[in-house]
Amino acid sequence: MITEFFKACEVKKVTPTLAEVKTVFDQIAKNKKEKKETFFSAFDRFTLMVGRESDWDEDTYIKSGVIRRQLEAFDKALSFENLNAGRMIDYLSYLRVKRDMWNTTIVKNLGFIKWFLRWALKNGYPVNQRALDFSPKLKGTDGKIKKVVFLNIEELGVVLFRRTLYF
């Protein structure tokens, strides 16, 4: 809008006054306040835009909807401004306690939310950097697979025999 204003002044060959420029800036600020999107409308926009760009399959759209409903159930008034590291901890606790999720699922959901937050930051939303930097250490999610040891029949017999001696 400001570029159009200056272009119009240039075409008319007039120099705008400070008051005119201030009026245009005030109008831009007013329009931004009126167009302020909510966290969830931005999430819907992310789903629509990135879903098309990345050619999501049906399962990814379903996952996006599930995560949106979980976020909304966690806090209907969630906003970019109040989503910080502390709220992320609260959200993880909510998923663990109220939704009875495993840490591996929580980490996947957190990854999807961070994808959304990176997109939002790139598109001019006021994302709290602490929410993006949030990286919890959850057991069983480090990606290291522990070697499973199987006992043969003889070893199992020895173990069972030793247990009976101690009880």
Image (spheres, rainbow, N blue to C red):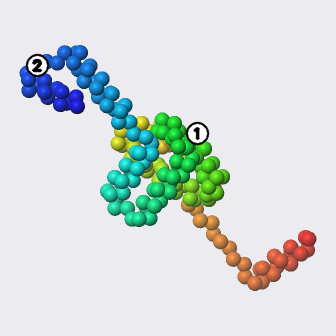
In the image, residue 143 lies at what x, y percent?
Answer: 56, 60
Question: What residue do we see at 75% from left, 84% from top?
Answer: 153
In the image, residue 13 lies at what x, y percent?
Answer: 8, 21
Badge 1 amino acid: Gly
In the image, residue 138 lies at what x, y percent?
Answer: 61, 53
Residue 117 visible to an observer of this rendering: no
The reply, left or right, for residue 25 in relation to residue 111 is: left
Camera-side residue: 28 or 153?
A: 28
Q: Which mark is residue 130?
A: none
Mark found first going from the N terminus, 2 or 1 = 2
The reply, left or right, for residue 51 in relation to residue 22 is: right
Q: Quadrant of the C terminus?
A: bottom right
Residue with the mark numbered 1: 86
Camera-side residue: 120 or 163?
A: 120
Does residue 127 sit above or below 92 in this rendering?
A: above
Closer to the observer: label 2 or label 1? 2
Q: Quadrant of the N terminus?
A: top left
Question: What residue do we see at 26% from left, 19% from top?
Answer: 22
Does residue 10 sit above or below 139 in this rendering?
A: above
Mark 2 secondary-structure assignment: loop
Q: Which mark is residue 14?
A: 2
In the image, residue 54 lies at what x, y percent?
Answer: 34, 59
Mark 1 secondary-structure assignment: helix
How dense is the environment of label 2, judged by Cα within 10 Å: few (below 14), some, or many (20 and up)? few
Camera-side residue: 111 or 12?
A: 12
Question: What residue do we see at 50% from left, 57% from top?
Answer: 66
Does residue 90 sit above or below 63 in this rendering?
A: above
The reply, left or right, for residue 154 in relation to residue 35 is: right
Badge 2 amino acid: Val
